[in-house]
Amino acid sequence: MYPKVVIDQKKLYDNAKIIVDKAAVKGIRVHVVTKVHSADIKLAQVCLDAGACGVADSRIQNLEKLKTLDCEKILLRLPMLSEVDEVVTLADISFNSELCTIKALDEAAKRANKKHRIVIMFDLGDLREGFLPEEVDEVIPEILKYQHIVIEGIGVNLTCYGGVIPTYDNLSELQRLANHIEEKYDIKLNIVSGGNSSSLYLLDGDKIPTRINNLRVGEGVVLGREAAYGEQVHGTFDDAFILEAQIIEYKTKTSLPKGIIGMDAFGNKPVFEDKGLMKRGIVAIGRQDVDHGALIPMDTRINIIGASSDHMILDFTDAQNDYKVGDIVRFKMEYGAMLKLFTSEYIGREYI
């Protein structure tokens, strides 16, 4: 079946092991984030085999897919009030930043006759989820009232929304909060979670505070790179996942459309550059399946021109003698492309 993603499980294993081992030197455990491949249980197991201590995902539906795995499971996205019963059933730990939601989780855990562990999120500047640091002494006493909630730890998210890079300084604020909570409220925090793949660059040298003992890593495992500066982690692979798409048209056409230009299928008015005649090919994949701007042709002579819902148009001018209808074009991908590819029901998967 085309299009499909070809997954090299050995390369994925090697990526995960390198990162898990690198973190372990600093006393940090890694939960592998599975949302990027839509919680593919085979790939989650590969990462667990490489030493990841558990899985983490943003969607409760994905944790449902992974429920048979013998490991710790974390719900990363703040729970919706409408799903608290599923959360206490399917997630060992959930990340939280709203007292009303924690109260609802306590009630759900009581109904299930169990205790539910939470990581309290603090916003250290990225302006996504989290209590403000100055709210700590309002929040902790309220949470401690709940008999079916256990404060497992605290955490922060950086880079994903505001682009704020994790540093020794802002993670030291998380460390300060952890020390304050433990000393003032006489509780032990098992998790001090210092972010995601954007924190991986801090593992080199003495750049990460000693209390940070957890990272949630997705991009670092699947693409082998840290997400703060986009640098490859030494020894990892950026081609464990390859997209293969088939050519369905291959013709010489002009580079400029003819006629009055209006909106395209997505409500944008396109702009074109006159490059004269061009050898243009179409592959059978489109914006419904992938962010085409986050694909990298493995044949460097090919350029991506654009895409509609179901068609991606490529410039083959510099490679015009090598391709024909039915041939396969292969692409590496950025994180955003992988997210959409694994969500689309029209993309096949091949495991090697």
Image (cartoon, grey):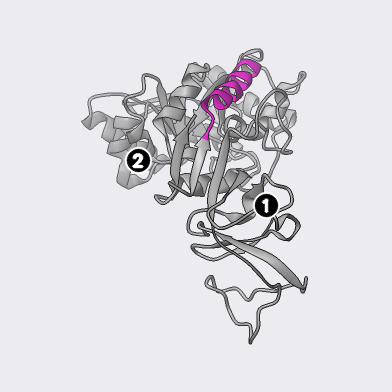
Above or below residue 64? Residue 100 is below
Q: Position of residue 97 (x, y in %)?
A: 48, 40
Residue type beneath disc 2: Gln
Label 1: element kind = loop
Residue 205 placement: quadrant? top right
Q: Nearer the viewer, mark 2 or mark 1?
A: 1
The residue identified by callout 2 is 61
* Front residue of this view, candidates 85 and 140: 85
Is residue 219 visible from the viewing direction of this image? yes
- Residue 210 placement, left or right of 130: right
* Front residue of this view, candidates 145 and 284: 284
- Residue 232 placement, left or right of 107: right
Residue type beneath disc 1: Asp
Identify the residue shown where x is 68% and y is 45%: 163
Q: Position of residue 304 (x, y in %)?
A: 66, 58
* Front residue of this view, candidates 193 and 316: 316
The number of numbered discs placed on residues in the rendered structure image is 2
Above or below residue 295? Residue 316 is below
Is residue 187 visible from the viewing direction of this image? no
Identify the residue shown where x is 67% and y is 28%: 200
Q: What segment carries the magenta color?
A: 7-22
The residue identified by callout 1 is 322
Identify the residue shown where x is 49% and y is 29%: 352
Label 2: element kind = helix
Q: Earlier in the sequence, mark 2 or mark 1?
A: 2
Above or below residue 341? Residue 37 is above
